[in-house]
Image (cartoon, rainbow, N blue to C red):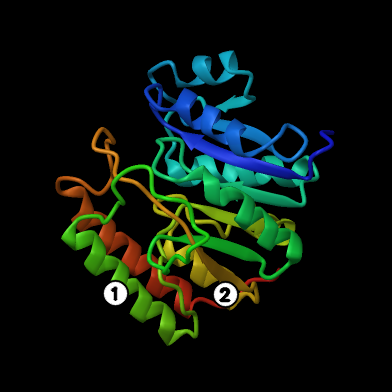
Amino acid sequence: MSPSDTIIILPAYNEANHILQTLADLSSVSTQAEYDLLVINDGSTDQTADLARQAGCPCLSLPVHLGYGTALQTGYKYAVRNGYRYAIQMDTDGQHDVRFLPEIHRQLRLKTADVVVGSRFLPHDETSPTPRRPIYAGTLLRRLGIRLFRIILRLWGLSVTDPTSGFVGLQRSACEFLATDIFPFDYPDADVLLLLHRNGFAIREIPVYMYTNPERGSIHRGCAPFWYMIKELLAVLFAGVRSREIV
């Protein structure tokens, strides 16, 4: 077992153009003793896995492309089975500013919450670093969707500004919960936060930067945003009315 009690979960699908820079950015804000890194290669057809391993980062490869949710849960299960106390998930395409990772980690260690969400919509103070690239705003439909999810989550007593953030830190208890069959594999976003909230997990947000990535083959382009909105809306509503799970 590693001397570190924290693992960084990095789901990746065809991120050969970005994985090395992401790993280099991570090394600039951490030491080997602070975090363990794990790339979850979601059936990439490019050199994502090879590049990650060449950079010295452990990489688990799924046999085929199974989707973002499956890649994430693979990381949760790995974290639980290997005894990690904290897990932090972030994207490998460069959209998440790794300079905020230490603050997420600090909040987990202070036990201010079971789940710490990086929000692009919270205001920054004078201590925040200067943004490195244009800030990601999302399409109009995406922004409207986020506002709708905020309203729906408030109906169940959960107030979050960025319900679709993928920059998230979790205590071990939250990882154990999400490593079960309750976890949704399609678009694990606002519905996951609501499931956690309804099962007694404390959630807080901190301000972060997220950047525009014009190269990304996003689920939020073309006709995909419409289907994402419909499916995620149904998932959130189902998460709100389903019975509480046994934690």
- Specify the quadrant of the image occupied by residue 95: top left
Q: Is residue 102 left or right of residue 70?
A: right
Residue 20 rendering spot, x and y as whole percentages: 48, 23
Q: Which residue is mark 1?
A: 148
Is disc 2 surrounded by few (<14), some (14 to 19) or many (20+) residues within 10 Å?
A: many
Q: Amino acid at mark 2?
A: His
Q: Secondary structure at mark 2?
A: helix
- Specify the quadrant of the image occupied by residue 148: bottom left
Residue 68 rendering spot, x and y as whole percentages: 44, 43
Quarter of the picture containing the N terminus is top right
Residue 180 seen in the figure: no
Where 178 falls versus 158 (above or below)?
above
Q: Secondary structure at mark 1?
A: helix
Residue 83 rendering spot, x and y as whole percentages: 80, 45
Q: Amino acid at mark 1?
A: Leu
Residue found at x 50% / y 16%: 51
Q: Which residue is mark 2?
A: 197
